[in-house]
Image: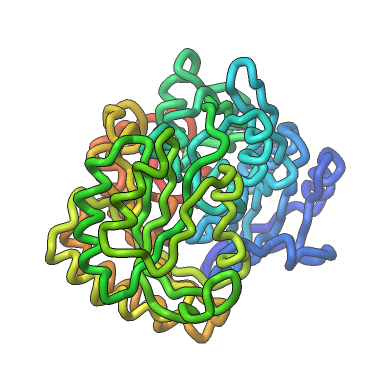
């Protein structure tokens, strides 16, 4: 099998080696000639259309080790796919090998010790379903088909961030296959440097085959969206920016610009209207009292779906609006403050959403997450108040040009008011972002990450990611 590495280089894969890999594999080794290849190479973002030479669907850790060794020995570009949700498509690669962890999706809850052992291919829906049976939860995400591995390694924002921290703040240990094919467990007590790097450093250091998370007694929350007319968005955003940073940790809410979906259960009179909204999540014991002043702030909201809801139902509430297979283009920044000049820019572009699925979200990352020392994990922006993402989304590739133009223009005008870097899970790849964006996103932690990279992946085998090159 001969594949193009670039316009000027090719790599020849020994067919005998491929056959040997198949024979020692418990999972599936899928190549372009195999039935189901196109279905198995697809990722969440349909804007990403890559053709791997081999997709290794791993059934166990032994398969992962064999795949890593094969990619290294054959000189193949290597990508690791957990949920396949990455907006930049960093879970796949042209002409290389994809380690597909999707068969490794088990979750084992220990209710006595309040922990969950989660395999590397599990999705948030798998995790929240398993933990909810015991009245427990761990913070991470707002869409249930997001992969646990990808979101965790990048940090892990979610509805419980202000109350319980990021996903990485609740990670106790991780099992990792390294670039040399060896297997280690990283925690505070063993391979502590690797454990530090995994908590925010993305997929740069190895293949995480399982995570051990701390769980918390979270069952039913008081949560859901409130929407206001677009003409009130300046007032709502100015109020929100001051209110949420002073709110108790029990209260979370992300601000959004959106177009009301033209379908039930949304009221027909709101269909296709551009609006602003806040999606709330409250874990305290006085929901009605806490929300009474919010509901009275601007008069009755145009839509108020805030009420008691099981935690997994909140986590999957927006899944139908964003199914796999749509076109996605993301731009992101960390934000420390939102001055009036930034509010004006938000209002301008919030009124110009290019498609009904396109949106902008401001996710709070203060509270408990903001009180963790910035050098405690690889996540550098503990002093930021929000993680902002601008997303152009549509099922139609014909919309891509105007979605991309809108997102880039929006971001370029707002970037001077940012903290400098961005949440790596919400960035496009280096060809779009530039390598300096990765450095900016890790800030003071970048050089330490490079040294750890040199220890665990000196040849940069794991480079199909927001890459941290090994120190020289």
Q: How many marks?
A: 0
In x, y percent, where is residue 201? 41, 39
Q: Quadrant of the N terminus?
A: bottom right
Q: Residue at x 54, y 81 (%)?
A: 397
Q: Residue at x 13, y 66 (%)?
A: 341
Q: Nearer the viewer, residue 176 or 94?
A: 176
Q: Nearer the viewer, residue 327 or 94?
A: 327
Q: Quadrant of the C terminus?
A: top left
In x, y percent, where is residue 218? 53, 33
Where is residue 408, by image quadrant? bottom left
Q: Residue at x 30, y 47 (%)?
A: 441
In this view, the residue farthest toward the top is: 189
Say whether residue 293 is left or right of residue 197: left
Q: Nearer the viewer, residue 432 or 252?
A: 252
Residue 176 visible: no
What kind of colouring is applied to the model shown?
Answer: rainbow
Residue 364 visible: yes
Q: Is residue 159 above or below residue 373?
A: below
Q: Is residue 406 above or below residue 26?
A: below
Q: Residue at x 61, y 40 (%)?
A: 128
Where is residue 85, by image quadrant? bottom right
Q: Nearer the viewer, residue 262 or 460?
A: 262
In x, y percent, where is residue 14? 75, 52
In x, y percent, where is residue 13? 71, 54
Q: Is residue 70 above or below residue 362?
A: above
In this view, the residue farthest toward the right is: 23
């Amino acid at each position: 099998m001969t594949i193009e590495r670039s316009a000027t280089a090719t790599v020849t894969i020994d067919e005998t080696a491929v056959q040997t890999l198949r024979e020692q594999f418990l999972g599936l080794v899928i190549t372009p000639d195999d039935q189901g290849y196109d279905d198995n190479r697809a990722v969440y973002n349909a804007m990403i259309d890559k053709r791997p030479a081999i997709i290794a669907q791993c059934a166990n850790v032994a398969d992962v080790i064999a795949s890593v060794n094969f990619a290294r020995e054959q000189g193949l570009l290597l990508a690791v796919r957990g949920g396949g949700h990455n907006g930049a498509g960093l879970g796949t690669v042209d002409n290389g090998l994809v380690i597909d962890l999707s068969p490794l999706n088990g979750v084992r809850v220990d209710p006595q010790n309040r922990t969950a052992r989660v395999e590397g291919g599990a999705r948030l829906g798998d995790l929240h379903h398993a933990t909810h049976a015991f009245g427990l939860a761990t913070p991470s995400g707002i869409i249930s088909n997001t992969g646990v591995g990808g979101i965790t390694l990048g940090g892990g924002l979610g509805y419980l961030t202000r109350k319980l921290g990021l996903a990485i703040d609740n990670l106790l240990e991780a099992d990792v296959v390294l670039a040399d094919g060896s297997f280690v467990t990283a925690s505070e007590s063993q391979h502590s440097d690797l454990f530090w790097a995994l908590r925010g450093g993305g997929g740069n250091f190895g293949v995480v085959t399982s995570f051990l998370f701390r769980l918390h007694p979270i069952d039913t929350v008081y949560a859901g969206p409130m929407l206001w007319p677009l003409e009130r968005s300046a007032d709502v955003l100015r109020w929100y920016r001051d209110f949420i940073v002073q709110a108790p940790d029990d209260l979370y809410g992300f601000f959004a610009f959106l177009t009301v979906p033209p379908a039930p259960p949304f009221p027909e009179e709101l269909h296709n209207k551009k609006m602003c909204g806040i999606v709330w999540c409250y874990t305290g014991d006085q929901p009605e009292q806490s929300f009474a002043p919010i509901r009275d702030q601007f008069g009755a909201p145009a839509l108020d779906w805030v009420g008691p809801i099981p935690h997994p139902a909140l986590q999957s509430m927006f899944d139908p609006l964003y199914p796999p297979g749509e076109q996605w283009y993301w731009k992101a920044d960390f934000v420390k403050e939102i001055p009036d000049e930034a509010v004006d820019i938000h209002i301008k572009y919030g009124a110009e959403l290019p498609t009904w699925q396109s949106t902008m979200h401001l996710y709070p990352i203060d509270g408990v997450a903001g009180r963790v020392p910035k050098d405690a994990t690889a996540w550098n922006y503990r002093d930021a108040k929000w993680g902002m993402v601008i997303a152009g989304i549509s099922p139609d590739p014909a919309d891509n040009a105007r979605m991309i133009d809108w997102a880039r223009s929006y971001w370029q005008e707002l970037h001077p008011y940012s903290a400098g870097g961005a949440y790596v899970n919400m960035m496009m790849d280096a060809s779009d972002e530039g390598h300096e964006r990765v450095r900016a996103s890790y800030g003071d932690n970048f050089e330490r990450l490079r040294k750890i990279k040199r220890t665990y992946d000196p040849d940069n085998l794991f480079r199909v990611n927001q890459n941290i090159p090994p120190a020289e």
